[in-house]
Amino acid sequence: MDARYLPAMKTLTVREAEKQLGQLVAEAARGDVIVLTDGNVEVTLTARAAGKPFDPEEDSPELEAELLKAVDGPYTPYSSEEMRALGEQIIRDQRKQ
C-alpha cells in the first residue's frame, strides 16, 4: 500500500495528551490514529460518522475513564461537563470543514 494513503499514527501518555486534547481530537477527526496510554491501558481516538453525537459512555468507556482522570487531575481547570462540551464543539467544527 502506498504510504501517502496511510493515516498518521501518534501515541501519547494521558499526561502528554492533557495539554493538546483539542488538537488530538481534530487529528482523529481527519482520520489520524491517536493512541492514548496510561500504564498498561491503551485507548484509541477514532472519528465517528456525522449525524450521531459522540457519547463517551457508550462509544468508548475506556476513553471516558481516561478523560475523567484528566479532568480530576491537578492541571485541568475544567469540569467534566465543560470538557465534554469542548470536545463536542471541536468535533462539530471539524465536521463543518
Image: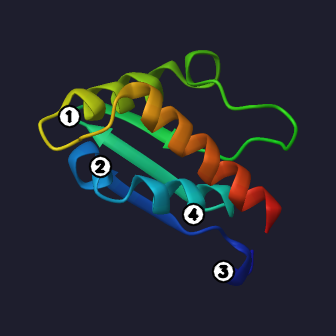
> Disc 2 versus disc 3: distance between alpha carbons?
29 Å
State left or right for residue 46 relative to residue 23. right
- Category of crowding for the residue at label 4, using alpha-carbon neighbours closer than 10 angstroms: few (below 14), some (14–19), many (at least 20): many
State left or right for residue 94 relative to residue 65. right
Q: Secondary structure at mark 3?
A: helix
Q: Residue at x 69, y 83 (%)?
A: 4
Q: Residue at x 60, y 53 (%)?
A: 90
Q: Quadrant of residue 49?
A: top right
Q: Mark 4 is on which residue type?
A: Glu
In this rendering, the label closer to the viewer, 1 or 3: 1
Depicted 29 relative to depicted 6: above or below: above
Viewer-proximal residue, 28 or 42?
A: 28
In this rendering, the label closer to the viewer, 1 or 2: 2
Quadrant where the image shows the N terminus:
bottom right
The residue carrying mark 4 is: 27
Q: Mark 1 is on which residue type?
A: Gly
The residue carrying mark 3 is: 3
> Disc 1 versus disc 4: distance between alpha carbons?
23 Å
Disc 2 vs disc 4: Cβ atoms closer than 8 Å? no
Q: Mark 2 is on which residue type?
A: Glu
Viewer-proximal residue, 8 or 16?
A: 16
> Disc 1 versus disc 2: distance between alpha carbons?
15 Å
The residue carrying mark 2 is: 18
Q: Earlier in the sequence, mark 1 or mark 3?
A: 3
> Disc 2 versus disc 4: distance between alpha carbons?
15 Å
- Residue 23 place in picture, x, y as percent: 47, 63
The residue carrying mark 1 is: 39
Q: Hey, which residue is sitting farthest left in the picture?
A: 74
Q: Earlier in the sequence, mark 2 or mark 3?
A: 3
- Residue 50 place in picture, x, y as percent: 85, 44
